[in-house]
Amino acid sequence: MPLSASALHRRGVEAANARQFTRARRELEKAAARTDDADLRARIDGTAAYVLAQTGEPAAAEALCREALAREGLQAETVALLGGQLGALLMHGGRMEEAEASLTAAIDALGAGTETTALANCLMNRAVVRMQRHRLDTCMADLRRAIAIYEAHEERDSLAEATHNLGYAALLGGDLVSALRLMAASRPTFAATSALATAISDLDRAEVLRDAGLTTEAEALLAQVAVQFGAQRMRQARGEAEFHLARSLVRHDPRAAARAARTAARRFTSLGSSGWAARAAAVELEARQRIRPDRPLDAAAWEQVAQELDRSGFRTEATALRLTARRDGTGRLPRVPASAPTPLRLRAQEVRAARAAGRGRDGEALRAAATGLDLLSAWQRSFGALDLQASVAMHASDLVFTGLAAAVRRRDPATLFEWSERARHLSQQVAPVRPPHDDALAADLAELRMLRADLAGADWTTDPTVRALRDRVRERQWSATGSGAMRERRTLAEASALLPADTAVLAYVYTGAGLHGVVVQPDGATLVDLSWPRVRTALDGLRADLDMAALTRDGAMGPVTARALAARLAVLDEELLGPMRRAAAGAARFVITVPGILGGVPWAMLPGMHGVPFTLATSVSRWLDGEAPAASTPRVGFAAGPRVARAAEEVQRAAESWAGRGTTRMLQGPTATVTAVTELAASVDVLHIAAHGRHAVDNPLFSGFELDDGVLFGYDVDLIPRVPQTVILSACELGRSSVRWGEEALGMTRVWLHAGAEAVIAAPVTVPDDDACELLAAVHDGLSAGASPAAALAAAARTTGVSAPFQCHGNGF
């Protein structure tokens, strides 16, 4: 017996909800051919309009919906449902005011009776409209009402969508942790529905990652979903993915952003989505300004786009565009209320700082930039996870560089020192709270270890199961980690007063265009200008030379690579270190703070630093407030991983230095498992690990070292209830960092320091096993005699004659 028109319509709705649009169209056509009922036919046309809109025919969809609404004799409920559908179509076209009016009329009509799923659907769509207009309180109220209805009707798929949208509203309100948590809760339902439903979820999730500063992951996800939407002929959704890709690229690759924005704008224009076309055009204008900041603006073109954004209901983006257009100092700045989203208030301070700097008002520029950074600090208080704290520095990059440049122009060491500390403090001003042990997180990390072993030799990060697990680990970490008190920054006067007589601070500052330094000593401070062009030339290829020199030292190419590396290090010694050391005449040891761009410099290998005690502090303020590791009878732990030729010898020789001076424990071979090493770390004051290490550029918290049963990741460190005071990582690359947004450098050393270690000894590049064995075994001679980690490392370099890139991070003395 053939299905009825009602049954066919239900099947068409189910197919459309599952994003199976070809099947939906087929079922709806059959349903329409089998009914003369005016109300049912109108509802069929309403669903067909949704399918047309999703497959790139918005004008036809709106026409069909309006034609159905114009028919006479329709029931009030049918009119309300069609009005809700029309509102959804207007919303996707960027006509927000019309959309909200249509949806509100439908909600008022449907809300007079029982709480139906049709009413919940209209509430969902109105919430999206209000979300786009940044009316977040009323948006969330609509979503919570819709969620209650879906729960009462056990509508699992719709409930997941409403929960996801509540996460998106949290994103717009700046609550990135709640946004990711809510979206993660919905994702399994989408994944069980279809790949396309998952892609739609991932489009919004990529926005969370982008706003968190994790642009590499966001952009890969956006490129992937754009392809999926294209394959399904979902032109509007594809354009939205391209638009968000452009927004992610604009700060760090404006040329690519401009291309992506132009593509999206053309797509939206062809679909008649004027509001979305204006959003894309706004991103293209900002990208072009970043490409050529010296080119005069076409003020009329910028204002035309801003007016179109206003007409379409995107008033926050219109304000942001008008702010950017005034960056050159022309015109009056639009008013930004205190209730505006944090990124918009940050942009207002960026523009105020840039305008003041352009007029030569450096004091005013510094005040505006400082106000912006204080605003970011208040936002960061809601984050405890290290990767999130470091990544949201994206929103501060322009403020930091404007402030640093203005501080350099003032030629005042106190001001430049203050701004150096501001830059160093971005991801560490919130003191972390140790999260409770999370068994589920530990299980996910164990599964990742097994997958990494199974996929040895392949790019394990591209495996879908690995990606899903990595995402879940990060989401758990973001949600579980709380934030603590704000750390204070020290002034130059305080730093000078607290410095020991034999110690100098070498604080390096990069403004985006030049390199400078402040040398701080007990009797005052000196501002030093450095040759950035020469330093940059020496830095280019430095890591490759270091790795090559380590790998070819015994071959025919050994002398050649050694000479090339020596020449490069000599330039760095002369141009980077020499002027600062001369200004710090008389100092015997050094506290060095560096911007991310200098994070790969092997300071211990520079001729002027061989055998000299120094520590790479995360900031001078944190160094002054910390304590050098010390214990009267320290407990010392050693672990040797597999496939390191002299690892066992290294830890055995190091352990011998502690005979009669402390208690030691050693793990090697089958006993050196991740669980055993983390348990060892929780019970000792000094931990020495000799193992193969690998830095993960895309997410440094997935850096780690290889043990008998797999990799101990950076995320594992947060599962250790109490970390050692001193950590020695005899593992290639684990002193290396990924630079984020010009200033922030994040790597395994920072993970241990963030977790509570006082000092970490590690190397940023490959180190020959022989050098590691000789140098680090000798370090324990000094540690066991009571020397600080930095002093012990310097003494080991002098006594062994080994020049290696191992350096001390944190509170080395």
Image: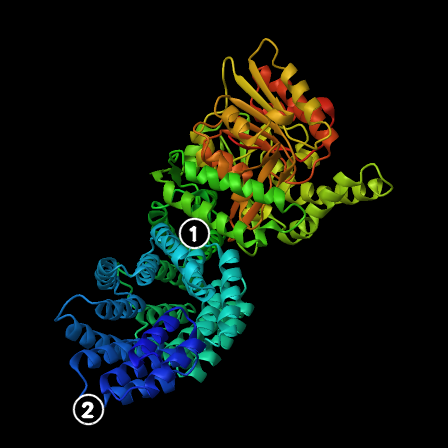
**Where is residue 651 shown, x and y percent of the image?**
65, 22
Label 1 sits on residue: 392
Residue nearer the viewer, 538 or 394: 394
- Residue 342 is tagged as none
**Where is residue 120 shown, x and y percent of the image?**
24, 66
Left or right: 781 with respect to 31? Answer: right
Label 2 sits on residue: 72
Q: CA distance from mark 1 to mark 2?
A: 55 Å
Label 2: state its secondary structure.
loop
**Where is residue 190 shown, x and y percent of the image?**
40, 60
Residue nearer the viewer, 487 or 679: 679
Left or right: 771 with respect to 380? Answer: right
- Is residue 579 visible in this depiction of the protein? yes
Q: Earlier in the sequence, mark 1 or mark 2?
A: 2
**Where is residue 354 shown, x and y percent of the image?**
43, 62
User: Disc 2 marks which amino acid?
Assistant: Glu
Mark count: 2
Outermost residue toward the right in this view: 556
Residue at point 28%, 89% (across, down):
67
Residue at point 45%, 84% (across, down):
270
Name the front one of labels 1 and 2: 2
Left or right: 52 with respect to 810? Answer: left
Left or right: 806 with respect to 473? Answer: right
Q: Mark 1 and mark 2 in contact? Answer it, CB < 8 Å.
A: no
- Answer above or below: position of 17 versus 554: below
Label 1: state its secondary structure.
helix
User: Disc 1 marks which amino acid?
Assistant: Val
Outermost residue toward the front in this view: 1
Quarter of the picture containing the N terminus is bottom left
